Image (cartoon, rainbow, N blue to C red):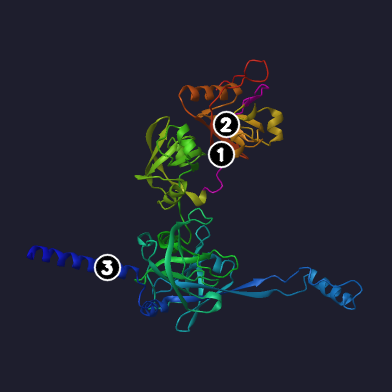
Amino acid sequence: MVMQTAIAMMTALALLVSQTLTADAQSAPASFADLADQVSPAVVNITTSTTVAGNTGTGPMIPEGSPFEEFFRDFMDQQQNGNRAPRRSSALGSGFVISQDGYIVTNNHVIEGADEISIEFFSGSTLDAEVVGTDPNTDIALLKVAGEPEDLPFVSFGDSDKMRVGDWVMAMGNPLGQGFSVSAGIVSARNRALSGTYDDYLQTDAAINRGNSGGPLFNMDGDVIGVNTAILSPNGGSIGIGFAMSSAVVTKVVDQLKEFGETRRGWLGVRIQDVTPDVAEAMDLSDASGALVTDVPEGPAAEAGMQAGDVITSFDGLDVADTRELVRRVGNTEVGKTVPVTVWREGATETLQVTLGRRETAEGAVPAAMDATPQEPEEAQVLGLTVSPINEELRETLELTAGTEGLVITEVDEMAEAYEKGLRAGDVITEAGQQKVTAVADLQSRIEEAQDAGRKSLLLLIRRAGEPRFVALTVDGDIPAPENDDAPATTEQ
């Protein structure tokens, strides 16, 4: 009896503790006042001033015959002759101090094109600032106040990777010119991408409006875990969908801007696309993951032996889920570092040692051209496509480079899978089954090989205006013969 009573008491106590913890986890903070007092001195309002050229627009429309017609004609003539003086334009934004000596983080779009930048502190004092560096790719800018200030209040970055959906956050800034406003909410989602290559946004329902741009998003410890950057809204006002660039991205950018005045991102030197389920099936991959290499121009990857058709499954010891993850991971790796890159190639894995270049100096790199080989006229209908080897007429019509080899798609059946997957007339098939094709017979051979191996689809490398991508097409069914009776053209490789 005593034992049963003890067990019952312990069960009741455990239930009470569990309920208490659940209530604490679900309840909002009693107040954000202490946190606001703690971080407010480090949050700033940013005012920019820009010189705008005189307006040379069409101006008001005046009815013909109006008594004001002649007056407005003379007025508009003066404007169009450039007689109207330039004017000053101002804009407002937010930011936050990250060091005692006055380094300030904000959005690039807040200060872009500004002639003058003024910083207003919570105390009411103002200081001028200069741009240290900017990164349009992440919309981050680093400023430094003029002079040699001492003991400025500042805040530190926290770890955005530790934030969970549902965690409380607080935003501060200068929304709609109403300086030093506070709003609170939760993390609504993580790892959001908008339009940038290196996007890693925290989504929040804390109210963010125009003017909040560049302001901090705090965790409950007063650490900055995001920089408020954008909102999703049909009317320009907050509807509870705001985005803050994660501190995991911002800290790396800020460190480079502070040291170099610019970003220095790693560069692998490949063009890539995601591995879709049909592509994975065509390549005998167990999972639709990794990054499929579509092109390897001259650069670090080419020097290490990487090839188009390789699937990058691991970078620097970590698995690669998709192209977005690979791009971010490469960009965050030190320029000049040699890293192991594991690829899936023709049914086996291979590890290459790649010494990364710098992306910023390689932005304009283009693939090296291959030698062209003339083709005899030939045409066939295969996989819902009408294809023909490249001849001089097609090369000139499609403005193909001298080094382009492959089969030109001259027509696509709109009822076929190929049309559904985006193939169009003018596209060039350069590889099938990860082997070059220069004649219709090559493509037909690749289809037969895929069918004989029991594969349901065939992987094609397509180029459109020079840009490559892989597409997997179903190969079930018979293979039609070429429409002409001539023997297939062959090419010496």
- Real-space Cα separation, disc 3 to disc 2, in angstroms: 64 Å
**Residue at figure coordinates x 52%, y 55% from the top left:** 196
- Quarter assignment of residue 113: bottom right
Residue 262 position in % (x across, y down): 48, 59
Q: Which residue is mark 3?
A: 19
In this view, the residue farthest toward the bottom is 124
**Residue 270 seen in the figure:** no
Query: Which sits in the foreground, 148 or 430?
Result: 430
Query: Which sits in the foreground, 217 or 401?
Result: 217
In this view, the residue farthest toward the right is 65
Quadrant containing the N terminus in the rendered view: bottom left
Q: Is residue 164 left or right of residue 212?
A: left
Answer whether residue 303 is magenta in the image: no
Q: Confirm or deny contact between disc 2 and disc 1 (CB under 8 A).
A: yes
Q: Amino acid at mark 1?
A: Pro
Q: Confirm or deny contact between disc 3 and disc 1 (CB under 8 A).
A: no
**Residue at figure coordinates x 42%, y 67% from the top left:** 186
Q: Is residue 182 left or right of residue 363?
A: left
- Real-space Cα separation, disc 2 to disc 1, in angstroms: 9 Å
In this view, the residue farthest toward the left is 2
**Residue at figure coordinates x 44%, y 63% from the top left:** 188
Q: Which residues are magenta?
A: 362-381
Which numbered circle lies on residue 468?
1
User: Of helix, strand and loop, which one carries label 1?
Assistant: strand
Residue 53 position in % (x across, y down): 70, 70
Residue 483 position in % (x across, y down): 67, 20
> Of marks 2 and 1, which one's residue comes earlier in the chain?
2
Q: Which residue is mark 2?
A: 430
